[in-house]
Image (spheres, helix red, strand yellow):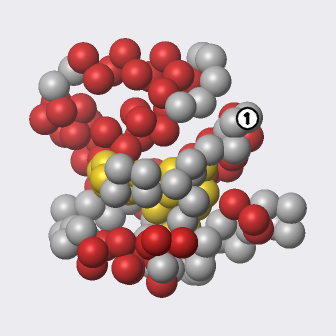
Amino acid sequence: MINNIPKDKRLILFDGVCNLCNSSVLYVIKRDKKNKFLFAPLQSKIGETIINEFNIDTTEVDSILLFNPETYKIYSKSAAALHVGKSLNFPTNLMAAFFIIPAFIRNWFYDYIAKNRYKWYGKRDACMIPTPELKAKFLD
């Protein structure tokens, strides 16, 4: 299943019931002019497969993962968000400047937002269902 992801793509795994995460996915789709990203909820079969493959503790990481099939590497938390941002067009790619901040500081802010995301932005009862024109960007 993981080996079926095209090597020239990056897979963003997101919390499918989180309104902030769903809005972030739509933000990336709108700005992904190079068609570099694919998406899947963490709650999907591919999400569970990657979580198990990389032994990810879902009590520590429960909002975003970025999988690079070319290097077979996984990024989480602020590193995932920044790697996504730097791959998008200007001005979003300027987010890469935040890599200068040590990861423990970036992740403290990331974790604070992630911990409060349901309270601040709400939660859905089920994962987002992509529109027919976006369906090709989503994996099950």
The amino acid type, in three-letter code, at marker 1 is Lys
Judge the density around disc 1: few (<14), some (14-19), many (≥20) Cα neighbours within 10 Å.
few
Quarter of the rendering occupied by the C terminus: bottom right
Taking the image as shown, residue 89 lies to the left or right of residue 14, namely right
Nearer to us in this view, 108 or 118:
108
Q: SS for tag 1?
A: loop
Vertical position of residue 27 compared to residue 38: above or below: above
Q: Is residue 138 visible?
A: yes
Name the residue tied to disc 1.
33
Residue drawn at x 64%, y 24% is: 89
Residue that lies at the very extreme toward the bottom in this rendered image: 45
Task: Pinpoint residue 10: horizontal percent, then vertical percent.
Answer: 51, 51
Task: Pinpoint residue 83: horizontal percent, then vertical percent.
Answer: 41, 36
Vertical position of residue 130 compared to residue 38: above or below: below
Taking the image as shown, residue 108 lies to the left or right of residue 34, namely left
Residue drawn at x 38%, y 80% is: 48
Nearer to us in this view, 25 or 118:
25
Q: Is residue 117 visible?
A: no
Task: Pinpoint residue 19: horizontal percent, then vertical percent.
Answer: 56, 59
Classify residue 74 by image quadrant. Answer: bottom left
Nearer to us in this view, 133 or 21:
133
Vertical position of residue 54 compared to residue 35: above or below: below
Residue drawn at x 69%, y 60% is: 137
Residue drawn at x 29%, y 23% is: 99
Classify residue 50 by image quadrant. Answer: bottom left
Task: Pinpoint residue 88: horizontal percent, then vertical percent.
Answer: 59, 30
